[in-house]
Image (tube, helix red, strand yellow):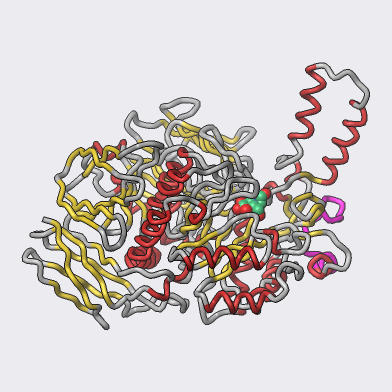
Amino acid sequence: MIKKYRFGEPFETGAVLEQKKAEDAELTFFQVKQGEKLSFFKALEETDRIYGLGENVRGINKRGWIYKSECNDVPIHREDTRSLYGAHNFFVIEGKVKTGIFFDTPSAITFDMGYTEYGSILIESEEPDLDVYIIEGGSILDIVGEFRRIIGRSYIPPKWAFGYQQSRWGYRDEKDIREVVREHRSNHIPLDAVYMDIDYMESYKDFSIDKSRFPDLKGLVQEMKEEHIHLVPIIDAGVKIEPGYQVYEEGCEKGYFCKEEDGTEFVAGVWPGQVHFPDFLNPDAGRWFGEHYRCLLDCGIDGFWNDMNEPAIFYSQKRLEKVFAKFGAYQGENLDTHAFFKYLEAVNGLGGNSDDYKQFYHQTPMGRIRHDKVHNIYGYKMTEAAADAFKRYAPERRTLMFSRASYIGMHRCSGIWQGDNLSWWSHLLLNIQMMPSLNMCGFLYTGADIGGFGSDTTEDLLLRWLAFGIFTPLMRNHASAGTREQEVYRFGNQNAFRNIIGIRYGLIPYLYSEFVKCAGDNRMMFMPLSFVFGKDERTYDIEDQLLVGDSLMIAPVYTQNANGRFVYLPEDMVMVRMKSLKEKTLEKMKQGDHYIKVAADEVVFFIRKNKMLPLSCGGESINEIDENRFELLAGASWDSAYELYRDDGYSSEIREDGIIIVNIDKRGSVEMHGADVPEVKVLLAD
Ligand code: MIG
C-alpha cells in the first residue's frame, strides 16, 4: 500500500506518474521536525538493513554512512564521498517490518543512515516543500515493484546498445574512429558502437562538427553502418558564448538561458570556456534545445550521451573575477601558511561551488525559481528534452540515450552511466554493488566505464572488469584523456579479450529478454541474494554476488592476483565455466560454501535450480546473433523453465507475442510454446 504525505507546496519533479491524493493524516512513520531544515527521524532495529539510494558509494546495504542527494561532478570519488552524479531518493528499510520510502524533492537532501547514530536514521531536506511516499506490505521485491509502478516503465534502448561499445576521451578525428573499428574487426573482437567524445565538436560547441576532423559525418555514419557500427556523440549542457554561433544567438534571443537575479544571463566556465546554461526547466527552452539534436539525427546518428549536466561548473565568471582580485592582493607578499592555504582554498573552491548554484534562476511553469532549489532535476530535464525530440523526429525506432546526471523519472526516457570512476579494483566492486540500487530506482540501462575512466588500467583489471561487464546492459570500455590506452587490442592476451567479449554475445538474447521483461513488469534485473533468498540469513552479508535476471547468479572476481574466490550458493546450482562460447563445462554444485578457481581468461557463473540459460552462438555484432538457434543450459534431472522474450530490437513497443515458454523435464525433453519457436540443443549438467 502506498501513502503520500505532502509538506508545503512541492515543485512538481515529474518522478511519479500516478497522481495520488495526499493523506489528510500526519506522517507518523518518522518523527518530523521543522527547524532550520525539515527533518525526519526514525529509530532502527539492531538488524535493520537499508537498501536503495541508487548511484552512491559503498555497499549494497547503505546502513552506516551519510549520503547527500546533490548531483555532483566527482571524478575522484572514494569511500567517504557523499554525493555522486545522480539523486535517487528511494530506499527500503528491511527488517522485521519492511518499508519503502521515497522523498520527492528537486533540491538537496541528506540521508544519515546510521552515521551519526548507528541506531537511527535522520533525513534532512534543505527545502521545506516535498512529498514523502511510504510503501508498506509484502516482500522487498513487492515494495520495489510498487514503487516502480508509480514512477512508470523504465527506458528500453535499441538492442544494439547491448553490444560491446568502445569509447575514449581522445578520439580526435575520423581516422581514430576508423582505426578503432578496424582493430576490432580485424582481430575478430565483437563491437557494436564507437563513441565520439567532446573533440568531435568545433571548440566544444554543442551541435557543431569540426569539419577539419570530420569532413563528412553523414558519410562516416553510413560507412560505419555498413560495418554494423553505431557512432554515439556526446552533448554537453553548457552552450558556448560566441557571437555568431547559432545555438548561442537563438538561446539569447529567445531568453532560453538561465539568468541571474538582475535578468542577465549567468556565465559559467566549462569545456568551451564561458557558457550559458539552457533553462531545461522551461519546457519551451527544452523543446528548442531538443530540436538541435536533429542535425545529428539527420546524419544517421541514433545514439547520444548527455554529459556535464549536473550541471558541472569549472568556475562562475563572477567568482573567478573575485579570486583574481584576491590573487592580486597576494602578489609580492610573503605567503605564510595561513595565507597560502587561503589562496589554495580560493582556487580549489572555484569548481562545483554550491554557492554558484544560488546565483541563477529558471523560468518554470510554476514561476521563477532559484537553481539550487531544483538542482537535482536539471540533468533529468535536459535528457527528457532530448528524448522528447527523438519521439518527434525519429518515432519509428528507439534511440540510445544515457545521461550522467539523473533523478528518478529520467529512468523512463534514458539510461545512465555511472560517472567518472577510476581504474581501481575498488571501483569494479562499486560497479557491482551499484547495480541493484540503481535497478530499485528504475534505472535498468546502466553500466560503468569498464576498465576505469581515470588513472591507468592494467590488463588483469580490464579482463576481470569485462568478465563482470558482460552482464551489465551498458557494456562500454571508456577512459579519460591522459590515461593508459585501454582498448582491448592494446594488450597481450588477445584471445582472452576476444573470448570474454564473445561470451557477451552468446548471453545477449538472455540479457535482452530479461531486460525487457524487467522493464515491462517493473522488476529488478540485478538483485542481491537476500532479496530472493531472504529466509537464509547467510545471504544478508553477501554483497559481492548478484542474481542477474531470472536464471543466473554471478560472483565476479574483483581483487588483483586472485586465482579464485569463495562463493556461497543459497541453493543447488549449475556452475558454468567458460573460456569461450565453445569451450565450456557445466557442473552441478551443492548449496553451501565453495572455493572456486577462476583464471583471468575465464568467465564463471551459475544457473539457478529449475532455471535455464538460453545461449546463442554469438557473433561479432548484434546483427550476427542468430535468435532462432539456442543451446539450453540447465541441470539434469531437474524440471527447468524459462520465458524467452524476443523482438526486432528497434521498434518502440514491447511485442505482445514475443514470449516463448520453454520447459525441460527431468528426462531432458524440451517443450516450447509460442510463435516461431527456435531450434534448440540441450546441454545438461549432471
Ligand atoms: O570534465 O567529455 O564523465 O565520460 O569523457 C570531463 C570528456 C568531461 C566527463 C565524462 C567523461 C567524458 C569527459 N567528461
Side (left or right) of 504 relative to 597:
right
Residue 632 is situated, as x and y percent measured from the top left of the image, at 21, 66
- Residue at 42% x, 51% y: name it: 493
521 left or right of 257?
Answer: left
Q: Position of residue 354 (x, y in %)?
A: 71, 40
Residue drawn at the location 49% of the way across and 48% of the way down = 451
Whether residue 632 is visible, yes or no, is yes
Would residue 9 be visible to someone looking at this image?
A: no
Towards the viewer: 671 or 381? 671
**In the rendered structure, which segment of residues is drawn in magenta?**
251-266
Q: Is residue 254 magenta?
A: yes
Q: Is residue 244 above or below residue 561?
A: below
Question: Residue 55, percent across and down?
Answer: 50, 47
The N terminus lies in which quarter of the figure? bottom left
Q: Is residue 374 magenta?
A: no
Drawn side of residue 248 relative to residue 121, left or right: right
Q: Main secondary structure of the magenta part?
A: loop
Above or below 621: residue 57? above
Marker count (numbered): 0
Q: Residue furthest left?
A: 667
Q: Quadrant of the C terminus?
A: bottom left
